[in-house]
Structures are given as structure tokens and as C-alpha cells.
């Protein structure tokens, strides 16, 4: 991005574009990390903190629309990976995955388009607010709810962080993850630590406060008070397999199933019912006060439904328990040809509610959905409420005044564990305990802070029964009071940021048109120019520091040179004095008419080249030997004058000393 400075030069702003291979490495690593943070059975909590950083870096260092296309492909790959690991691939779900990927790409595109037009504090909110708003829109508009696209599902095992959803809903965790990604990218793009210090410290402080507050809630405010023994039971695996074999012998469609049931279907259904009634008697005798069957725990033809309900009422009355039964009823009414419902029977044998599933699994279940009104009933063991399986993936309908939420479910091996873990979010959000019996999945019970009270895997146990002591009193959470207020605030914030970005662009165009500069499409708005000036000031301070260091180095070099020059000057003065002494010796030798042989002996001390200090010493020795015989008194006088010459600053001529 370019800006024009007062001198008319064009300066580059924004992050420096990396090498193409580096950008593709970020995209590849980000997609790989995203595959491990999709709310599936292979999730790694840390991967949810890593992939937004890399994908956001990829988006910010390239073109907006081409980068958005690649990010859509990355999000699509992650969604298809989730479908594959969950055994959910159908044409309908693949189309849904592409649509969800498009929605999840919007935060990256909005960040790329707006972040350089807004003031720094507003630019930091674009990506996190967009992520939270997108998760909220998926919950509102798509048939998938929070089954896919909610990053809170990747953090269900991090209980201190999970307590945040009791205030903001699941959208608060997505906001926090995206905010951390923005802070890391701000540090990545900054010229120095000082430029990004406030952003990073603020984000780290908020994250630390959230974790500490969540830890304090877990440590100092655990569920307290009386508990009730709840048993979740399913039929034996052998009976389930026999019933499936009977259904496999059916030759017609759902309509023919009622009119012409296959041989052996009714006996198989009755065997499953008898097995569940026996499990209810066993658990009631062991002390259970509430017994829950899984979703469609008993499958019956419409004609057999009254007899099945009557048998369950009789068992509840005899065992003196609250009995929640799940029925799958085959009917001849098109287009669904069936109902998916639950009934709560009290110890008196009275049916307290009949509830029909409100959210069928997209592309898998075709029955007519219920009205979505969650039933509740007051009991001596707290206020009970009930939804069925996939209904719990829609937070809006799960916000009900209850102490214990019963969620009968029926999953499959590839998805049961992941789906059950996500149910813990609803318990923390609404402040109630949650019991989720899961046929062919993982049965679990959670308290109102997300702790696992009991858990059983259908495929690893012989007796299909799970017992938990569940608190009978729930809590009132902030999310229970304000609902999706935080999500609506994020959605409104994204709208406000869009308006601010558009206004900033228009202001930049008007400013440039008035100045008669570049083409309006290439002009940055005033907010971006202000950020550019701040960045230039930071670079100027850095340059001043470099220049100060270089100036100090030059000063040291000059001082060292001066010392060397003074040293060499001192040596030159010594050489000059030695030359004067040589001339003195020559004159004395001439006056005394020395013989040629004597002058030849003096020549090595006078003419030989070599070390200056050594020559001076040799010449002084030669002077002394020659002058002892010629003028001993004058020699002693000259030595005295030479010793005191440095102090007086005067030098006597060689002739006078001679």
C-alpha cells in the first residue's frame, strides 16, 4: 500500500510481502493445523490457537480476493476432513461444507479489506468480532448449529477457559482465539517490540485474566448440595444387532414397513423393550431415582406404540422412579413416515411430557420436526428438562430454567465421543447438570461447570449402563441472563467497522482528489496515513540510534588515530636528535683529522639502516668512545644539557656542545 509524504515521495506501508514460497508454507501449515481443530475426534486444543495465526498471515500478505479464494479452499478442506472422520459424507453435507467454508472465510477477507483503513484500536477488533459474528450466523441460519464451525468445541477439555462460555456463550472463545491471532500478527508486522508491545500485553493480560477467573470458579465455587443417582441404560448389544438384522430383511420403503412388516421385526422390537425394562428394574433396585433410555431406544410400529408406553408406565410405577423413554415410531403418514419422541413418566405412572425432536440431522433424518419447545417438570430432584441429541447443538433452545437437562441420543462409533463432549458447552452456558445417554456412542454426565461425572463407551463395555450422582440444584449464569448479547454485539460491531472502513475510503478519495495526486483507488485514507507516519517515526528513531552508534565508532577511530600520530611524532623527534648527534660526530672527527681507518670503524654506527632506536643507541656509544679522547669535559657537559633539555624545551646546537 502506498502513501504520499509531504515531499512528494511515495512510501510503502503495511507488512513487507514475503517470498511466494513462504506464503504457501503458511497456507499449507495453517490448513494442516485446521484439520486438527474442527470439533472432531482427532482434535488437538493447541491447533485451534495456531491455524488462525498462519491463515491470517497468509491473507494479510497477498491480494485480497485471490487470497480469499485460497482460504475458502483451505476451509473447505478442513470441513470435508471433519465429514470424513465423522463418517458423514453425503452430497448434502458436502454442499453444506462448501457453504460453511465460505462463511468462515469472511473474517479473513474483512480483515484484509479493513485493517489498513481503520485506526489501530479498531483494526485489532475486525478479525475477532468477525469470527464471533460468523459463528453466531452459522448457528442462526444453517441447519448444522454448533456441530461444525464453533472453535469452543476444540477447548472443552480446558476447563478454566471453558468457564468463559457462562458469560459470552461459545462465541467468546472464538473471539479470544481470533484476538490472539491478531495480536501475534501485529507483533509479526511491527518494526520493533515497542510498536506492538501494548497490543500483545493487552491481549495476554485479558487471556490470563480469563483463565485465572475460570480457575477460581472451579476451585472456589464448585457445585455444592444434594445429589441424585441417575442411571442411563441401553439394551444389550446382541439385542440391537438382532433388531438391525430384522430391519435389513425389509423389502419395501418406509411406507411398506408399517403395512407389511418383515418377519421377525415385532419379536426383535419386543426383545429390545424387555431388555430396557429389565435394566430399569436393576438400576432402580440399586438406588437410581431417575432412569433414562437413549434416543429411539425402542423402535415400534404405530399400532404397537400404546402397548409400549403402557409397559413403561407400569415399570415406572413399580420401581418408583422417574423414567425417560425414547421411542422411534413408524407411521404411514408421508413424507416422514415416523416420529422421534421422548416421554417422561413419573413414579405414579403419569406421563409428564411428550417431546418430539426439533432438529433432524441434515441429510440423514427425514421425520417431521417438533415445535422446539423444551419441556420442563418440577420434581423432588430439581427441575428436569429434555431435548433429543442434535437439538443440543443449538444454544438458543437450550437456554431454559432447569437443574438437570436430559439429552437422549443415538450416534455412531466415528462421531459419538466428539458429539458428547460438545454437550458440555450447553451445561456450562446454562448452569445445569446434563445427562446424555448415547446408544452406539459415548454416554456421559456433566455438572454445571463442565466436569465429567461419569462416562461409558458403548463399544467397550458389556453392560450398557452408566450411573452418575448429579447435583439437583443448578446455577444462574450471565449467559442465561443476557442470552446471545455478546454475539449480537460482535455482529453490530462488524457492521460499524464496515461503515467506518467505507467512510475512511471515501474520505481518502476526497482528500486525494482535492490534492490532485494519485488515482483515488490507490490513495490511503487519513487513518492509514497516520499509521504510516507513526511507522515512519519509529523507523526514524531506529535510524537515529544507528547513526549515534556509527558516530561513536568514528570518534573512537579518530581518537585512536590521533594517539598514533602523536606517538609517531615523538619517534620522529628522537630520530631528529640522533641525526644531530651524528653530524656532531662527523664535525669532531673532521677537526681531529681522524685517520680513514677510524672513520671506517665508525661507518656501521653512522650509515647502517635498521631499527631507529637501535641505531640511536649505537651512535651514542660511538660518540662516547670518540669524544672521551678528544673532549672529555665537553662530553660530560653535553650529556647534562641533553638530560635537562626536555624540561627547558631548548636544544643546544651540536657545535656549541662540541
Image: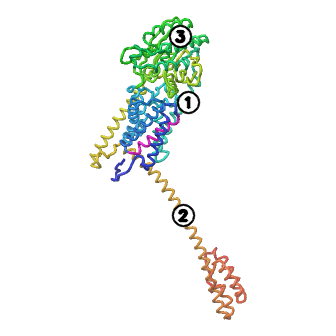
Number of residues whose C-alpha sits closer than 10 Å to that of mark 2, classed few (under 14), some (14–19) or many (20 or more): few
User: What residue is rendered at 41% in x and 14% in y?
Assistant: 260
Q: Which of marks 3 and 2 is in front?
A: 3
Number of residues whose C-alpha sits closer than 10 Å to that of mark 3, classed few (under 14), some (14–19) or many (20 or more): many
Number of residues whose C-alpha sits closer than 10 Å to that of mark 1, classed few (under 14), some (14–19) or many (20 or more): some
- Rounded to the nearest angstrom, the CA distance separating label 3 from label 2 is 93 Å
- Rounded to the nearest angstrom, the CA distance separating label 3 from label 1 is 39 Å
| Element under disc 3 | strand
| 126 relative to 593, above or below | above
- Rounded to the nearest angstrom, the CA distance separating label 2 from label 1 is 56 Å
**Residue 453, position in %: x, y?**
58, 21
Q: Which of marks 3 and 1 is in front?
A: 3
Q: Nearer the viewer, mark 2 or mark 1?
A: 1
Q: Give the range drawn in magenta.
A: 44-62
Q: Name the residue under label 1.
A: 212
Q: Residue 322 carries which label?
A: 3
**Residue 14, position in %: x, y?**
40, 46
Amino acid at each position: 500500500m502506498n502513501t504520499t509524504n509531504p515531499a512528494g515521495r511515495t512510501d510503502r506501508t503495511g507488512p513487507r510481502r514475503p517470498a511466494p514460497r513462504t506464503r504457501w508454507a503458511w497456507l499449507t501449515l495453517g490448513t494442516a493445523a485446521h484439520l486438527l481443530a474442527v470439533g472432531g475426534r482427532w482434535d488437538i486444543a493447541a491447533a485451534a490457537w495456531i491455524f488462525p495465526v498462519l491463515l491470517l498471515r497468509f491473507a494479510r500478505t497477498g491480494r485480497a480476493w485471490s487470497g480469499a479464494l485460497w482460504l475458502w479452499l483451505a476451509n473447505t478442506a478442513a470441513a470435508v476432513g471433519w465429514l470424513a472422520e465423522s463418517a458423514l459424507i453425503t452430497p448434502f453435507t458436502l454442499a453444506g461444507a462448501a457453504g460453511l467454508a465460505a462463511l468462515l472465510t469472511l473474517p479473513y477477507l474483512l480483515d484484509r479489506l479493513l485493517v489498513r483503513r481503520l485506526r489501530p484500536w479498531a483494526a485489532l477488533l475486525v478479525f475477532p468480532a468477525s469470527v464471533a459474528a460468523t459463528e453466531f450466523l452459522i448457528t442462526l441460519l444453517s441447519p448444522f448449529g454448533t456441530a461444525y464451525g464453533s472453535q469452543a468445541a476444540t477447548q472443552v477439555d480446558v476447563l478454566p477457559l471453558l468457564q468463559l462460555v457462562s458469560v459470552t456463550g461459545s462465541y467468546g472463545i472464538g473471539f479470544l482465539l481470533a484476538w490472539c491471532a491478531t495480536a501475534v500478527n501485529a507483533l509479526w508486522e511491527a518494526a520493533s517490540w515497542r510498536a506492538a508491545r501494548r497490543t500483545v500485553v493487552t491481549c495476554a493480560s485479558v487471556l490470563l485474566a480469563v483463565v485465572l477467573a475460570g480457575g477460581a470458579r472451579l476451585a472456589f465455587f464448585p457445585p455444592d448440595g444434594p445429589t441424585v443417582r441417575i442411571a442411563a441404560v441401553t439394551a444389550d448389544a446382541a439385542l440391537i444387532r438382532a433388531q438391525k438384522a430384522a430391519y435389513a430383511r425389509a423389502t419395501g420403503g418406509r411406507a411398506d414397513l408399517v403395512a407389511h412388516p418383515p418377519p421377525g421385526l415385532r419379536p426383535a422390537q419386543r426383545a429390545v423393550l424387555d431388555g430396557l425394562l429389565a435394566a430399569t428394574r436393576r438400576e432402580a433396585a440399586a438406588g437410581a431415582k431417575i432412569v433414562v433410555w437413549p434416543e429411539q431406544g425402542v423402535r415400534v410400529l404405530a399400532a404397537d406404540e400404546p402397548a409400549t408406553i403402557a409397559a413403561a408406565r407400569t415399570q415406572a410405577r413399580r420401581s418408583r422412579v422417574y423414567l425417560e423413554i425414547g421411542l422411534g415410531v413408524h407411521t404411514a403418514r408421508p413424507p416422514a413416515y415416523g416420529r422421534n419422541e421422548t416421554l417422561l413418566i413419573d413414579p405414579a405412572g403419569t406421563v409428564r411430557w411428550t417431546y418430539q425432536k426439533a432438529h433432524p440431522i441434515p441429510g440423514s433424518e427425514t421425520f417431521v420436526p417438533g415445535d422446539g419447545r423444551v419441556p420442563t417438570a418440577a420434581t423432588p430432584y430439581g427441575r428436569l428438562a429434555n431435548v433429543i441429541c442434535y437439538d443440543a447443538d443449538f444454544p438458543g433452545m437450550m437456554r431454559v430454567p432447569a437443574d438437570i437437562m436430559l439429552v437422549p441420543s443415538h450416534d455412531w462409533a466415528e462421531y459419538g465421543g466428539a458429539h458428547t463432549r460438545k454437550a458440555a458447552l450447553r451445561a456450562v452456558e446454562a448452569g445445569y447438570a446434563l445427562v446424555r445417554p448415547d446408544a452406539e456412542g459415548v454416554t456421559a454426565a456433566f455438572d454445571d461447570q463442565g466436569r465429567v461425572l461419569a462416562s461409558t463407551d458403548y463399544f467397550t463395555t458389556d453392560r450398557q449402563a452408566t450411573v452418575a450422582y448429579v447435583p439437583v440444584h443448578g446455577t444462574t449464569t450471565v449467559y442465561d441472563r443476557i442470552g446471545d448479547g455478546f454475539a449480537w454485539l460482535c455482529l453490530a460491531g462488524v457492521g460499524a467497522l464496515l461503515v467506518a472502513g467505507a467512510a475512511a475510503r471515501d474520505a481518502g478519495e476526497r482528500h486525494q482528489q482535492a490534492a490532485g495526486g494519485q488515482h483515488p483507488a490507490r490513495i490511503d485514507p487519513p487513518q492509514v496515513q497516520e499509521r504510516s507516519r507513526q511507522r515512519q517515526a519509529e523507523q526514524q528513531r531506529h535510524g537515529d540510534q544507528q547513526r549515534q552508534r556509527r558516530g561513536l565508532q568514528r570518534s573512537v577511530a579518530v581518537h585512536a588515530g590521533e594517539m598514533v600520530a602523536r606517538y609517531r611524532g615523538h619517534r620522529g623527534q628522537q630520530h631528529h636528535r640522533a641525526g644531530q648527534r651524528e653530524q656532531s660526530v662527523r664535525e669532531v672527527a673532521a677537526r681531529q683529522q681522524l685517520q680513514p681507518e677510524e672513520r671506517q670503524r665508525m661507518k656501521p654506527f653512522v650509515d647502517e639502516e635498521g631499527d631507529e632506536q637501535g641505531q640511536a643507541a649505537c651512535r651514542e656509544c660511538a660518540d662516547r668512545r670518540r669524544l672521551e679522547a678528544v673532549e672529555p669535559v665537553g662530553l660530560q657537559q653535553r650529556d647534562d644539557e641533553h638530560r635537562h633539555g626536555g624540561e627547558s624545551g631548548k636544544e643546544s646546537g651540536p657545535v656549541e656542545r662540541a
